[in-house]
Image (tube, grey):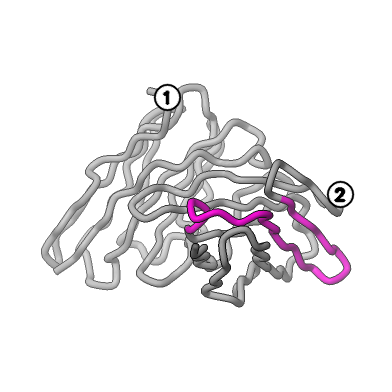
Amino acid sequence: DQQVKQNSPSLSVQEGRISILNCDYTNSMFDYFLWYKKYPAEGPTFLISISSIKDKNEDGRFTVFLNKSAKHLSLHIVPSQPGDSAVYFCAATADTDKLIFGTGTRLQVFP
Amino acid sequence: GAGVSQSPSNKVTEKGKDVELRCDPISGHTALYWYRQRLGQGLEFLIYFQGNSAPDKSGLPSDRFSAERTGESVSTLTIQRTQQEDSAVYLCASSSQRVDYGYTFGSGTRLTVV
C-alpha cells in the first residue's frame, strides 16, 4: 500500500522556468511533510518541509504548498537552474514517527 | 564525524552469502533508520531505532534481514543468504528526536548480489 505517491516519474523544464513537482498521500494522520533532493551516488538531502497546520512554506527559490482536503502537496522551484537536476522525493510522517517516502520524480533542467 | 558514514560504499557478493553493512550516525542523534532503494524504485523503509525503545522492524522484508544498534551509536544491517532481489542501495539516516526536522542520510552502500 503506497501511502505517498509521486505519479510523475520524470519532468523536464527549461532553465529559468518554473518546476512543479507533485505528491499525493492517502494517510490523513500525516502531520508533517518534507521534500528531499537526491543526486546520483549520494544520499538524499533535506530541502524543505511543511507542517499540516500551514498551507505554504517558502525558502528562497523553493516553495511547498499543502492542500489537506485534497491530500496533495507540491514543490515549486522558481527559477529553475541546471543544478536543480536531480531526483526529488516527497515524504510524510505522522506524530514524528518514521518518514514514508514517495517513489521520486526525476527533474531535468535544460538550458 | 560531521555526517552519517556508511561502509562499505560498494559490495559485490555471491548469492547465498551473508553480508553486513555498517552505519555511523551523527553524534547525538537518537534516531537511526535504514532504507533501501532498488533500481527504479523509491525509498523503502526497513527498520528504525529510537533511543532505548524497541526497534520498529515493520519494514524488514524477510527474516533474512536483521539489524542491531549499540546504544545511540553504530548500527549494522545483516542480510543472510543473500538473493539477487536484495541488490539495492542501502541507505542509513539519523535524526534528532524531532524527525520533522528531517533526517541526514549517508551516501549508502550499493549491494550487488551475483
Q: CA distance from mark 1 to mark 2?
A: 32 Å
Label 2: how many residues lie within 10 Å, few (<14), some (14-19) or many (20+)? few
- Residue in the foreground of this view, choosing between B26 and B59: B26
Instruction: Read off the chain for label 1.
Output: B
Q: Is residue B56 magenta?
A: no
Relative image position of residue A82 (x, y in whole percent): 49, 55
Please give the residue where the numbered disc 2 appears in the rendered image: A54
Instruction: Read off the chain for label 2.
Output: A
The answer to whether marks 1 and 2 mark residues whose Cβ atoms lie closer than 8 Å is no
Query: Vertically, is B42 above or below B8?
Result: below
In the drawing, does residue A101 fall left or right of residue A60? left
**Type of amino acid under label 2:** Lys
Q: Which residues are magenta?
A: A63-85
At 85% across and 63% down in the image, what residue appears? A68
Which disc is residue B2 wearing?
1
Relative image position of residue A38 (x, y in whole percent): 47, 53
